[in-house]
Amino acid sequence: MRKLTSAALAAGLCCASGVTLALDDSKDVLCATTQVQECPEIGGCAEVRPEDVNAPTFMRLKLKKDKIMVGTTRSVEIERSEQIEDRLILQGAEDGNENRPDGVGWTFSVNTETGRFVVAIAGAEEALILFGACTEI
């Protein structure tokens, strides 16, 4: 499971709890991961710290540029985005590398009313699920 350590883990976005986020594409959105579930093919999911699986604690969503930044150097492209009722759905896929040879696909769903998000990242025989919240900056 530790192989799912790419910029795909950076998929994150939205606002402070209880506040509606307009998602103005001229502003960046700062996101914080609050919980991570690591799910191998066999054995069930277990809660882990973000750093245990190289998941970002903080991410910056750049809606205008269709990118999600982790730190100052890592980024992932948002390949698809769609507003469905009170959720913004973002999706993408990343090629593998030495840390994650199988590549991953990801879906990020953020509730624009509450600012809470869920990210599902799927590899060949494993998945990560990230939970958190974001705010415009």
Image: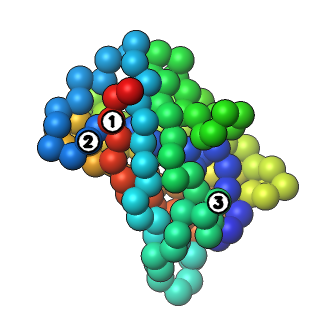
Q: CA distance from mark 3 to mark 1?
A: 22 Å
- The residue that mark 3 highlights is 54
- Residue at screen point 53% across, 86% down: 43
Q: Confirm whether residue 93 shows in the render.
A: no
Task: Find residue 12 and report its image quarter.
Answer: top left
Residue 11 position, x and y percent, is 50, 42
Q: Nearer the viewer, residue 112 or 123?
A: 112
Tell me which numbered mark, 3 or 1, is placed earlier along the sequence.
3
Q: Spot the residue most to the bottom.
A: 43
- The residue that mark 1 highlights is 135
Label 2 element class: loop
Give amino acid for label 1.
Answer: Thr
- The residue that mark 2 highlights is 16
Tell me which numbered mark, 3 or 2, is placed earlier along the sequence.
2
- How many badges with numbers are in the image? 3
Q: CA distance from mark 3 to mark 2?
A: 24 Å
Closest to the camera, between mark 3 and mark 2, is: 2
In which quadrant will I find the N terminus?
bottom right
Tell me which numbered mark, 2 or 1, is placed earlier along the sequence.
2
Task: Find residue 137 and report its image quarter.
Answer: top left
Q: Residues within 10 Å of mark 2 (few under 14, many from 20)?
A: many
Closest to the camera, between mark 3 and mark 1, is: 1
Q: CA distance from mark 2 to mark 1?
A: 5 Å
- Residue at screen point 54% across, 33% down: 68
Residue 4 position (above or below residue 43):
above
Asked if disc 2 and disc 1 are in contact, CB closer than 8 Å, the reply is yes
Residue 116 position, x and y percent, is 28, 48
Q: Spot the residue most to the front.
A: 137
Residue 25 position, x and y percent, is 38, 16
